[in-house]
Image (spheres, rainbow, N blue to C red):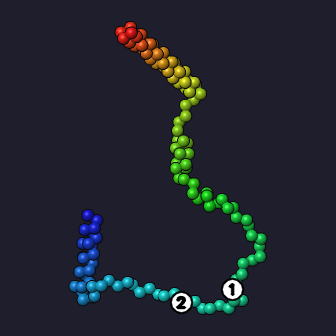
Amino acid sequence: MARTQRRRSATATSDAPAASGEPSRRRRDNLPRPAAAVAQPASSIPRPSAAPRRRRNPLAALGRFEPRWIADIVSELKKVTWPSWDETRHLTIVVSIVATVVGVSLGLIDLGFGWVIEKLLF
């Protein structure tokens, strides 16, 4: 659809100058050209001062390649509402109890099925 709109707008602008007698080709506005550079003698070219050069860090370029996702993770972790110490302790105890109960029950079911299979087949 965008292509069709561009074509329509292009034909609408190209038809208008042709109807008014101007050439149908679109002209670029004439912009002033920059003045020609005048050659300067070598003595007038400013030289850098003799200040001591700073040593560059060869690993500084790696700082630019830090992935953006690390900063996103840090910003998201700042938004998290962390549980208090009491909530953490309480929920840890609940998870431990549930895991123990499920483990024991699955173990008993496994022993029961093993006993049934042993009595039926052997």
The C terminus is located in which quarter?
Answer: top left
Residue 90 vs 114, above or below: the answer is below
Badge 2 marks a residue whose secondary structure is loop
Q: Residue 92's x, y, as percent?
A: 55, 24
Point out residue 88 in the picture as x, y percentages from the top left corner. Answer: 56, 27
What's the mark number on residue 63? Answer: none
Q: State the residue at coordinates (39%, 84%).
A: 29
- Between residue 5 and residue 100, name the one nearer to us: 100
Q: Quick check: 26 left or right of 34? A: left
Residue 100 x, y percent position in the rendering = 51, 18
- Give the CA distance from mark 1 to mark 2: 19 Å
User: In the rendered image, which residue does mark 2 sit on?
Assistant: 35
| Label 2 environment density (alpha carbons within 10 Å; few <14, some 14–19, many ≥20) | few
Please report the residue visible at 75 percent of the width from the left and 77 percent of the height from the top: 49
**Amino acid type, residue under disc 1 in the picture:** Ile
Which residue is found at the position 26% from the left and 64% from the top?
1
The tally of labels here is 2
Q: Could you say which quadrant of the image residue 6 lies in? A: bottom left
Residue 36 position within the rendered picture, expressed as x and y whole percent measured from the top left: 55, 90
Q: Disc 1 marks which residue? A: 45
Mark 1 nearby-residue class (10 Å; few <14, some 14–19, many ≥20): few
| Residue 53 location, quadrant | bottom right
Q: Quadrant of residue 21?
A: bottom left
Give the vertical position of 22 relative to 100 (above or below).
below
* Residue type indicated by callout 2: Ala
Residue 105 seen in render: no
- Identify the element where label 1 is drawn: loop
Left or right of 113? Residue 79 is right
Q: Residue furthest top?
A: 119
Judge left or right: residue 60 versus residue 112.
Answer: right
